[in-house]
Amino acid sequence: MTITLHARAALLDMDGTLVDSTAVVERLWLEWARPHGLDPETVLRTVHGRQGHQSMALLLPDRDHAVNLDENQQMLRRESEDVDGVVEIAGAAAFLSALASFPHAIVTSADVRLMTARMGAASLTVPRLAVTAESVSRSKPDPEGFLRAAAELGIEASDCVVFEDSAAGIRAGQDAGMTVIGVGPHAPSFGPAHHVDDLTSVRIVASGDGFDVLLG
């Protein structure tokens, strides 16, 4: 059964949605967590979809936030330099190509350097508009990034469709008043409006004042 949604803009998460960076994310974050004696499952459940300093604040709530900000910069540098195993999510290149003539943007918790490194490693084209960590004052699950992208594209939030994989990202899209499509095996448990296993199950077709998103 094919589900058809109409939209005027698509807002795309990066990690877990366009690129599979699971190996490097888990490798570096578990290495960071080990000296603190943190439970690995708790760490991996926390870090996906958020900016690093926010994840650190949740995992080490009594620590000076200035330390988190400093260590987050170190983590971003290491992640940008380590792209071993970073690949595209199946169908991502064709999906981005299909969106090329329509309003769309990346909305990611990565900074520009990390976004550029991972998209390059996966051989994916970065959209003209990218809302990155430098662009916002609050990380997902706050909806600021999605709302900023919609405003810069000149599209009402209700006319935007969000593609996300993480709990924080899906919550952010929902709180922005947008239709959220979950991507990947873990997304359904976070309550998106719709779900696909990967981007090979998504088609984009011009329609009226925007485009139709066909799922399935």
Image: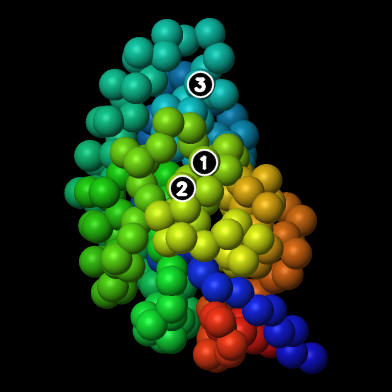
Residue beneath the point at 60% across and 74% down? 7
Query: Where residue 148 is drawn, which disc sits there?
Result: 2
Q: Is residue 50 above or below residue 66?
A: below
- Asked whether 26 or 6 is in front, the reply is 6
Residue beneath the point at 38% across and 20% down? 68
The image quadrant that residue 38 belongs to is: top right
The image quadrant that residue 158 belongs to is: bottom right
Q: Amino acid at mark 3?
A: Ala
The image quadrant that residue 213 belongs to is: bottom right
Quarter that holds the N terminus: bottom right
Image-based side of 26 in relation to 44, left or right: left
Crowding at dot 2, Cα within 10 Å, few <14 / some 14-19 / many 20+, comes out as some
Residue beneath the point at 42% across and 14% down? 65
Residue beneath the point at 30% across and 54% down? 115
Name the secondary structure under disc 1: helix
Which-is-in-front pick, marks 1 and 3?
Answer: 1
In 3D space, how far apart are the residues under numbered discs 1 and 3 (Cα atoms)?
A: 19 Å
How far across and how far down the image is residue 76, in percent? 29, 39
Image-based side of 200 in relation to 149, left or right: right
Which-is-in-front pick, marks 2 and 3?
Answer: 2
Q: Which residue is mark 3?
A: 57
Query: Where residue 144 is drawn, which disc sits there?
Result: 1
Q: Is residue 212 above or below residue 145?
A: below
Name the secondary structure under disc 2: helix
Marks 2 and 1 close (CB-CB < 8 Å): yes
The answer to whether residue 110 of the structure is visible from this angle is no
